[in-house]
Amino acid sequence: MSSTENTSPARRKLIAGNWKMNPGGRAAVKLAEELVCRFRNGPPVDVWVFPPAVWLMTVGRALEGSSIEVGAQNVSHESDGAFTGEISATMLSDVGCQSVIVGHSERRTLYGETSELVNAKALAVLRAGLKPVICLGETLDERESGRTGEVVERQFLESLAGISAGQMAKTVIAYEPVWAIGTGRVATGEQAQAVHADLRKMLESQYNPRLAAEARIIYGGSVKPDNADDLLGRPDIDGALVGGASLDADSFAAIVERASALANAG
């Protein structure tokens, strides 16, 4: 597929902030309030934030009236029942979430989540009327052994199993190489673009050319203001899943501003 198909109006850039297990409650509200002030006029890109579950309601209240959406970092694949410590997609919807990250590399590597479990979570998110952000990516060993394409394709097929074309239209894919998460290392623009282009071809094969052209595929892995242009200017990279830099209003706003400038230039 030609990257010139990136002109689809559905390919609005998305900058998402994954706060992980940070910050404390007051700091979370302050950060949310700072972002509301920064984006008061509504940037020409989508901005989502993913605070810890305990702050979802308070951050959601701080974001009320703004264009910033709030989402959750994780979810149970079960709808209800005796599952101590778990939170269902319906519960997340009830507290105002609009999206959920599933399959983040830290969930896969630290907690042993398989692509089959990621798939079950994504389907639960979709059933609840929320938007899943499905994360895929290879380890350093897998990249250095030349297995990036094989690993990403397997994760793609397993994580998206049973997701219809209609559901896929509400789904975001995040390519986040494990070796670039929290390490300070980052894929070059060329490396990230190559995987994003392959993922778009997989979408075309699995679904259809129109859906592949319109689907959003974002990059995650040590995204910062100083590398944002190199990544976000690529034809198949539709935004970023930002970790550490999303905890600083200045840094996160700078990334959003770079994405906005690129969107306006396009």
Image (cartoon, rainbow, N blue to C red):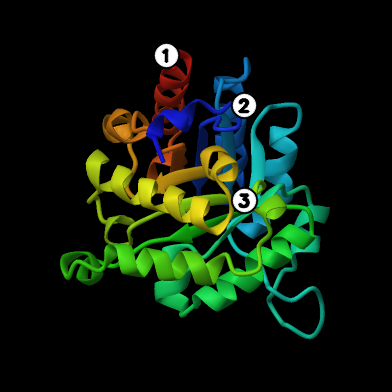
Q: Which residue is mark 3?
A: 171
Q: Check disc 1 and give the amino acid type.
A: Ala
The residue that appears at 71% across and 51% down in the rendered structure is: 166
Instruction: Tell me which label, 3 or 1, sits earlier in the chain.
Output: 3
Which numbered circle lies on residue 36? 2
Instruction: Tell me which label, 3 or 2, sits earlier in the chain.
Output: 2
Q: Is residue 95 visible?
A: yes
Secondary-structure class at tag 1: helix
The residue that appears at 64% across and 64% down in the rendered structure is: 122
**10 Å crowding of disc 1: few (<14), some (14-19), many (20+):** few
In this rendering, would 208 be left or right of 128? left
Q: Check disc 2 and give the amino acid type.
A: Val
Q: Quadrant of the C terminus?
A: top left
Q: Check disc 3 and give the amino acid type.
A: Thr
Closer mark to the observer between disc 3 and disc 2: 3
Numbered-mark total:
3
Residue 50 in percent (x, y) is at: 58, 49
**Which is nearer the eye, 149 or 129?**
149
**Which is nearer the eye, 46 or 21?**
46
Q: CA separation, marks 2 and 1?
A: 24 Å
* Callout 3 touching callout 2 (CB < 8 Å): no
* Callout 2 touching callout 1 (CB < 8 Å): no
**10 Å crowding of disc 2: few (<14), some (14-19), many (20+):** some
Secondary-structure class at tag 2: helix
Closer mark to the observer between disc 2 and disc 1: 1
Residue 44 in percent (x, y) is at: 56, 20
**10 Å crowding of disc 3: few (<14), some (14-19), many (20+):** many
Q: Which residue is mark 1?
A: 265
Secondary-structure class at tag 3: loop
